[in-house]
Image: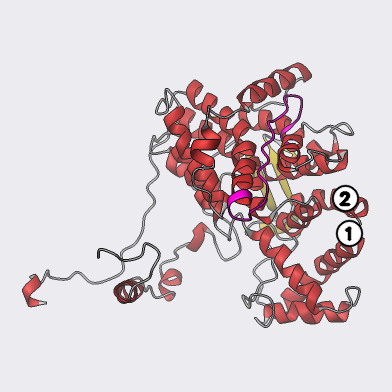
């Protein structure tokens, strides 16, 4: 239809969408009848086993006398408990994310010399192709930084002399470059958006070779490039906790799925970014921050358990915030008693709240953390326990760090690219078959009717 607006939903589209809705209907009872695992998970939260990995492990249950018993959540990177990794790091050490990236990629903790050499490699790759910022990032600013990031990753294909070479050495080279570039692609994408859409000044800082990933994010993002050691440390901890979470999370599974087709690294990682952009995966912390903003307006006395309880019940009854019936940041597909990432994060969050003068807000978060699990258990049918997940506090941390909401999910991606890279390497090295799960067709077989007889 010539002359139709690119963005306009026409009456013809509305009519065709009605056909699509009707054609897409599936009786939900069929999933139970044929034991189809919706979302590749059982009702009790156990995932369908579709692969084997030695990169990371998530535990939320333990077998006791033949029964599965809930336990405090555990997260292991290459066999090392992530809580121990963070706890054992030297005070003031801001290269924890780089150490974890090395561990995920190469299966062992680096020596001091190996970590130094690894950081030098990343520092050398922490630059973008000539005119890339001008020609790709600045050319067409987007309001969504995840789209900007995905477009930038796909554009890098054209700058690579061997983009389709899927040998282990070449894929590793590409992955290391992406790990190094992701902070720049994300922050520069935001600076472009800030300039063109928000009509603010355009400030582009070059990364510093002596800074870690966390330090460079703050350095490149802030106009004055200044930050405190605690700010850098907390952002580094956030990157560690988001770097990897098993092969079954949606974006990592996407990496395995797309990599199994034999496609190039840029296509595989951009597909993972598309998955992470989804609000059910990477955007939850924004929902938490917005929910608390609404709560602070509606609840007059933040220290009143009665008022906070009333608000949380209103959330569950679809009478508050976005009327979705959810308390964002509570519950996880795998964890029940606790999310180990949230447990670790909380120890640092309180320190930053004191430094930044957010003690009252932290107390409100702590109260919701205490009250919400019981309120949810009272109001809903539960198949497993509910506890705060890592998103419950991560958005609050980013808010205290003064990070724009537009970068919350890209920072998740800056961390998770290390995990995605490790899983892509695993898929490439194993030479697995292309993934091809089964879907059951539901419907009748029909006789084709000639067009003039319909």
Percent position (x, y) of residue 359? 91, 60
Side of 105 where 33 appears, left or right: left
Determine whether label 1 and label 2 are within 8 Å by CB.
yes
Whether 225 is drawn above or below 19: the answer is: above
Secondary structure of the residue carrying numbered label 1: loop
Residue 222 visible in the picture:
yes
Q: Is residue 320 magenta?
A: no
Q: Main secondary structure of the magenta part?
A: loop
Q: Which residue is mark 1?
A: 358
Calculate the distance from the C-alpha at mark 1 to the C-alpha at mark 2.
Answer: 8 Å
Give, as a single range, the part of the protein colored magenta.
195-213
Percent position (x, y) of residue 81? 75, 40
Label number found at residue 352: 2
Whether 133 is drawn above or below 36: the answer is: above
Binning the other alpha carbons within 10 Å of mark 1 as few (below 14), some (14 to 19) or many (20 upward) gives: some
Residue at the location (86% across, 79% down)?
A: 300
In which quadrant of the rendered view does residue 230 lie?
top right
Label number found at residue 437: none
């Amino acid at each position: 239809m010539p002359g139709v607006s690119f963005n306009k939903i026409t009456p013809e589209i509305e009519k065709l969408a009605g056909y699509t809705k009707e054609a897409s209907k599936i009786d939900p009872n069929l999933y139970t009848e044929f034991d189809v695992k919706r979302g590749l998970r059982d009702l009790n939260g156990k995932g369908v086993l579709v692969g084997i990995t030695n990169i990371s492990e998530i535990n939320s249950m333990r077998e006791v006398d033949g029964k599965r018993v809930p336990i405090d959540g555990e997260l292991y990177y290459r066999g090392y408990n992530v809580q121990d990794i963070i706890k054992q790091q030297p005070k003031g050490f801001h290269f924890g994310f780089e150490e974890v990236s090395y561990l995920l990629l190469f299966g062992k903790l680096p020596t001091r010399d190996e970590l130094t050499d690894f950081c030098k490699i990343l520092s050398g790759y922490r630059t973008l192709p000539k005119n890339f910022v001008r020609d790709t990032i600045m050319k067409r600013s987007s309001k969504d930084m995840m789209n900007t990031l995905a477009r930038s990753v796909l554009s890098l294909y054209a700058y690579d002399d061997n983009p389709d070479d899927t040998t282990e050495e070449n894929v590793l080279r590409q992955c290391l470059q992406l790990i190094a570039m992701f902070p720049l692609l994300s922050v520069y994408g935001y600076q472009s958006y800030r300039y063109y859409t928000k009509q603010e000044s355009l400030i582009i800082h070059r990364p510093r070779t002596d800074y870690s990933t966390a330090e460079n994010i703050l350095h490149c993002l802030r106009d004055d490039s200044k930050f405190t050691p605690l700010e850098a440390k907390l952002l580094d901890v956030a990157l560690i906790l988001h770097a990897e979470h098993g092969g079954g999370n949606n974006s990592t599974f996407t990496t395995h799925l797309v990599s199994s087709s034999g496609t190039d690294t840029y296509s595989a990682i951009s597909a993972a970014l598309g998955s992470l952009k989804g609000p059910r995966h990477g955007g939850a912390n924004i929902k938490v921050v917005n929910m608390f903003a609404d709560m602070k307006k509606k609840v007059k006395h933040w220290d009143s358990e009665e008022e906070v309880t009333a608000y949380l019940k209103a959330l569950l009854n679809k009478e508050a915030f976005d009327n979705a019936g959810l308390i964002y940041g509570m519950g996880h597909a795998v964890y029940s008693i606790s999310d180990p990432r949230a447990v670790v994060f909380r120890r640092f969050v309180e320190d930053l709240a004191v430094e930044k003068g957010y003690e009252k807000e932290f107390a409100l978060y702590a109260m919701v953390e205490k009250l919400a699990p019981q309120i949810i258990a009272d109001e809903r049918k539960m198949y497993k326990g509910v506890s705060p997940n890592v998103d419950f506090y991560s958005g609050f941390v980013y808010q205290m760090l003064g990070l724009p909401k537009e970068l919350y999910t890209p920072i998740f991606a800056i961390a998770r690219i290390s995990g995605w890279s490790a899983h892509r390497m695993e898929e490439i090295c194993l030479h697995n078959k292309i993934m091809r799960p089964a879907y059951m067709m539901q419907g009748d077989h029909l006789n084709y009717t000639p067009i003039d007889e319909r």
